Amino acid sequence: MAEYIVSARKYRPMTFDSVVGQKALTTTLKIAVKSGKLAHAYLFCGPRGVGKTTCARIFAKAINCENPSTDGEPCEVCESCKAFNEQRSYNIFELDAASNNGVEQIKSLIEQTRIPPQVGRYKVFIIDEVHMLSTAAFNAFLKTLEEPPANVIFILATTEKHKILPTIISRCQIYDFERMSVPNIINHLKMVAEKEGITYEEEALNVIAEKADGGMRDALSVFDQAVSFCQGNITYKKVIEDLNVLDTDNYFDIIDYCLNNDTFNVMVLLNNILNQGFDGGRLIGGLAVHVRNLLMAKDKATLSLLQMSQRQIERYKEQAKNCPVLFLYNALKIMNDCDINYRQSSNKRLLVELTLIEIAQIIQSDGNSIISEQSHRKLEPVFTGQKSAPSTKTKQVSITTPSSENKPVAKEAIKTTENNNDTNVVAESNPQVQPNSKPTKLKGMTNSFSNMLQKNEDKTQSTDDVAEIKEDGEKQQFNDEKLALEWTMMCNRMPKNLIGLASRLKNVTPTIKEYPNIEIVVDNQLLLDDMLKIKNRILKTLVINLKNSDITINYRLAKPEEIKHIPTNQERFDELKENNKAFKEMTDMLDLVLE
């Protein structure tokens, strides 16, 4: 039985033309060999498995080739090329800086540079993972790297360029290697499969290429693994089973369900995925990539950003036709928030479920209109029975506010969100739309409230709302302590443009005069006027949060005897000295005064 050699070694490029995905760099190196204009030091940078060391070896072989081709390729037949290919060349040295990173190893290398080559023109030193050298080793290497002997060339390779001293970088010609594209990896895997007599499905090679994450060596390693598992017939189903990759059909199904508000089937599919052992975070990450690909497939200009097989691209284009752009954009934002919070979540499954429910309700079934994040909306019932399979067509999407024919905010919507901080006096959205007015864009919560104040329309826009709540309101008991708590929470939720009023309201203490009648006493007319402008909003907030529809509020100016004296800092300091003996002794001992 012949000795087995892994594909990454067996099909390692031996010429510049056989290097995959680095056309610009290999062309530059071939021209340098052809013209004889060689630098004394080169730095090859880039991710793992993209051909840095391979190109360094080919370049070193081409430099010493006795009969290079007209385009700068090594001839492969001269003694120097044969010696290199058979690993017996005395002119090309490789040093692994990861295990030889000390000063002694660098000094030994410097000693070797002083001996001229016995055969060929140059001694070439390839130092791999050069960023692993210690600072002392770098410093010992500096002078030789800057002015090496005329017959010495250094080629440094690294995956972490930022860890190399700037003084080293400045002495080298720098070549930045690119990550391998998915189509390039697929084409190379096809070549290897054909030479090995292996049958394959292009979708399976696409999965392997994506798994490699831009590294050809990784792709070939995964390819070997898949060949062993599939026994020479690489199929999509076997590859995703072997690599434990989630089938992309799940992502297509989830989006189809979400476009049809089919939350029931989304939850069932999620449960099946989790039961297969897949992590919820990986599902959200994969779905985000899928939605991003759909967004790219919406336009021909961005279609080239999809690095996958042509069959997959056509499938994305087909589903993208049914996806409104705003749906894709809002879905990405929702999944990004989930990804940020996933690690800190104590109930990760619940977080994933809530995320998918939100995505499934971006497009509302009543009118099928997209609701922006800033507007409030009533969430639809999640489980209303299993729906039929999603249709391939979606309705047209409207992004304007409802016209006057739509109903105002329902009582149920207020009840559903009465415990939500955003549904209080200063965070209310859904501005009224006058009859026969043109559709306008939805405004944010803060702007809606501030505009209402500026137009002094509080009475006309809030009185009906308060009356509506009082019709079927609750009658829960409350005391001064709970009243003060809800008052403070209301002040904290006021928008930024009312931050001044909020800070002044915090100094006001509402009291229960005759239950459930509340009295608010203020010490100046300006504050009283500002409060009267939003009195109906204040009442509405307290009615909702205290859950008592019998509440009334009386506002008045404080009488002179009711106005409390606010002590100055000096008065507080003197009072503290008078009431605290230890503090008085300390201030007297240190001779402290308040400035």
Image (cartoon, helix red, strand yellow):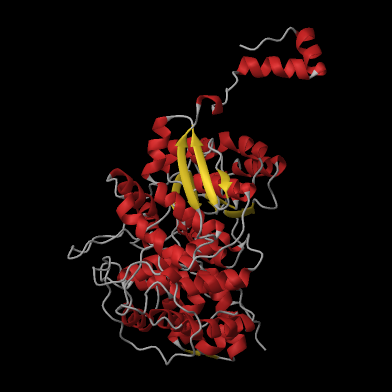
Rendered position, 464 above or below 450: below
Q: Give the quarter of the image for residue 108.
A: top right
Q: Where in the figure is residue 146, as x and y percent of width and height? A: 51, 36
- 500 or 592, nearer to the observer: 500
The front one of 207 and 506 is 506
Quarter containing the N terminus: bottom right
Residue 530 in view, yes or no: yes
Q: Position of residue 444 (x, y in %)?
A: 36, 54
Q: Is 130 on the left or on the right of 259, as rendered?
A: right
Q: Is residue 372 above or below residue 381?
A: above
The residue that appears at 45% across and 49% down in the rendered structure is 538
| Image quadrant where residue 578 sits | top right
Q: In the image, 334: left or right of 138?
A: left
**In which quadrant is the C terminus drawn?**
top right
Q: Position of residue 499 (x, y in %)?
A: 44, 39
With 18 as the anchor, is 476 left or right in this view? right
* Residue at the spot 27% in from the left edge and 60% down from the top edge: 441
Residue at image point 42% right, 80% down: 261
Compare residues 513 and 586 and report the one nearer the observer: 513
* Image x and y of residue 380, in percent: 44, 76
Q: Is residue 26 visible?
A: no
Q: Which residue is located at x 72 percent, y 41 percent?
A: 104
Q: Is residue 387 left or right of residue 112?
A: left
Q: Quadrant of residue 109?
A: top right
